Amino acid sequence: MKNFLPVYGPVKSWRYGNSLGIDPIGMVSTCSFNCVYCQLGKIERSSLDRQNFVSTAEIVDLVKQKSTEKFDVITISGSGEPTLAINLGEIIRSVKQITKTPVIVLTNGSLLGLASVQSDLLLADEVSVKLDGITTDRVDRVNRPNFRWNWEQFADSFFHLRHLFRGRMTIQTMLLSRWNHNERQAYINGLNQIRPDRVYLNIPCRPKPKLRLLQGRENLTESKEANWFKPLEMDYLEAFAQEIRDQSGLAVSFVMVHEQ
Ligand code: SF4
């Protein structure tokens, strides 16, 4: 793939304003999930092992070059699961030495239980964790993890990090179809257990390319070979968001995801 740069944008972010993207994963999309809606296309390398993909020095040089441009946040996500990058902590620490811009990590939470990942994430200002279901069955169908996902392990890891972390911890949930009463109730009970700072209910409004597409890191609006998801109705989303607020008191936003 030509023209790969591990720092890209700034791009408009639906949650954070102008976001400078850092991609610590690199040319080959690498993730522990292979979500049915992934905007990168089919994940090319399935992994749960932390390793060095892109050098910290290269990222720092590029962030320095971008420092004259205007952006509100720096978002670490890119071409897969960013906590797989073993130098994630070093990247955050180095970037913070050159800018005061808040650093946000978007993660699927697979490695949240590792002490090394937790200590890296503690350096960020916000950690936004994907939670697309409470049951192993739903996560298997939507996220297609390369390991046996289970709620108890996820909740323990989230809760542990939340107690150590001084920044914001948010949950992002992609809704592809209506959930029945029991699923919604189990989800709300789960949120009451882990108590995130905010819940984002996301609706996919961007294409899922059939093959790996580097532009998927940014705000992809079209792709020749892509699948599209039919968005859920607004009244259903509003009712679900209100149900969560009423039973948990948590802040909830729902977002049509066109952008990062
Ligand atoms: S959406 Fe995120 S977590 Fe899911 S496969 Fe793509 S990069 Fe991985």
Image (spheres, grey):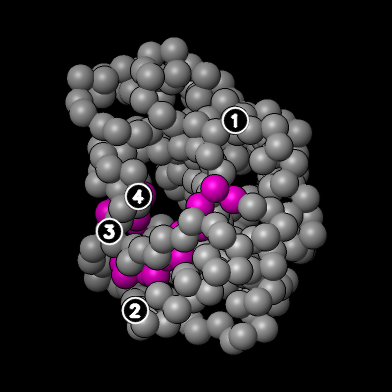
> Is 173 located above or below residue 195 in the figure?
below
User: Which mark is first along the chain, 3 or 1?
Assistant: 1
User: Which mark is first along the chain, 4 or 3?
Assistant: 4
> Is 147 located above or below residue 17 in the figure?
below
What x and y, as percent, mark residue 150? 76, 63
Q: Which residue is mark 4?
A: 15
| Secondary structure under the numbered disc 1 in the rendered image | loop
Q: Which residue is mark 2?
A: 234
Badge 1 amino acid:
Arg
Q: Residue at x 55, y 69 (%)?
A: 246
Which one is in front, 8 or 165? 165
User: Residue 216 lies in magenta, yes or no?
Assistant: yes
User: Residue 83 lies in magenta, yes or no?
Assistant: no
Badge 4 amino acid:
Arg
User: Which mark is first along the chain, 1 or 2?
Assistant: 1
Tell me if mark 2 has few (under 14), some (14-19) or many (20+) residues whose alpha carbon lies within 10 angstroms of its own: few
Q: Residue at x 33, y 66 (%)?
A: 256
**Alpha carbons under labels 3 and 4: distance apart:** 16 Å
Q: Which residue is mark 1?
A: 166
Q: Which residue is mark 3?
A: 220
Q: Are marks 1 and 3 in contact (CB under 8 Å)?
A: no
| Secondary structure under the numbered disc 2 in the rendered image | helix
| Secondary structure under the numbered disc 3 in the rendered image | loop
Answer yes or no: disc 1 within 8 Å of ligand 1: no
User: Which mark is first along the chain, 1 or 4?
Assistant: 4
Badge 2 amino acid:
Met
Q: Residue at x 53, y 39 (%)?
A: 168
Magenta residue span: 196-219
